[in-house]
Amino acid sequence: MSDPAAKIHKKDKKPDEFEYHVAQTIGEIEASSPDLKGELKDILITGASEFEGKHHGATRQAVIIFFHYRSKGLLKKIHSRLQSELTKRFRKPVVLLLQRTIIPKYFKTKGQQKRPYSRTLTKVHEAILDDLVYPNSILGKRIRMKADGRRVFKVLLDPTTREDIQDRLDVISAVYSKLTNKEVVFEFPQSRDFPV
């Protein structure tokens, strides 16, 4: 088995103990399953943390793993298999996200270069939501304003893959709220063709 530190890509900080443990677990999965070996060889993680937070009165626990953005294509291929393997090993829900950077609106750049649209706050938050529900697809989004001024994001998910994601929705909602400070509610419409 290769060195677990080689799986971690951090620019200025050393990996902490939990990140090292996650890299070691991914290395073990790579060694034990030959069908994942080719894809896991080139995947790098940029961070990992244990999440514990209250959501709708209940305590939710999860493991959040951030992957290098260049690993996007490989991660999408093996997402569901890797997520199930990691869930078995950690005995709690595992969330796989890509590391993204938000650039401030008034970021000073050289010359006339503009901030890329993919680095705006809105686009990064939308991409995090897409990563969280990945095997499932988002059919629509609504913003609901409460009487006290809070905003609640209603997200309509594909009803055909309801069984795959139904038990993880509370964890996904809690993690999204923690990462973005936005409250989100998931719903499944009756029909995929007319998600009203």
Image (spheres, helix red, strand yellow):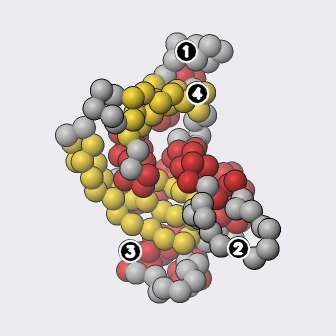
What type is the residue that disc 1 sits on?
Val
- Nearer-N-terminus badge (2/3): 3
What type is the residue that disc 2 sits on?
Thr
Quadrant of the image containing the N terminus: bottom right
What type is the residue that disc 3 sits on?
Phe
> How many marks on residues?
4
Numbered disc in front, either 2 or 1: 2
Identify the element where label 1 is drawn: loop
Residue tagged 4: 140
**Label 2: how many residues lie within 10 Å, few (<14), some (14-19) or many (20+)?**
few
Residue 175: percent from left, percent from top: 39, 50
- Nearer-N-terminus badge (2/1): 2
What type is the residue that disc 4 sits on?
Gly
Residue tagged 2: 109
Residue tagged 3: 18
- Nearer-N-terminus badge (2/4): 2
Numbered disc in front, either 2 or 3: 2
The residue sitting at 39% across, 50% down in the picture is 181
Disc 2 and disc 3: Cα gap in Å?
36 Å
- Nearer-N-terminus badge (3/1): 3
- Marks 2,4: beta carbons within 8 A: no
Residue tagged 1: 196
- Nearer-N-terminus badge (3/4): 3
Identify the element where label 4 is drawn: strand
**Is residue 1 positioned above or below 57 on the image?**
below
- Marks 3,1: beta carbons within 8 A: no
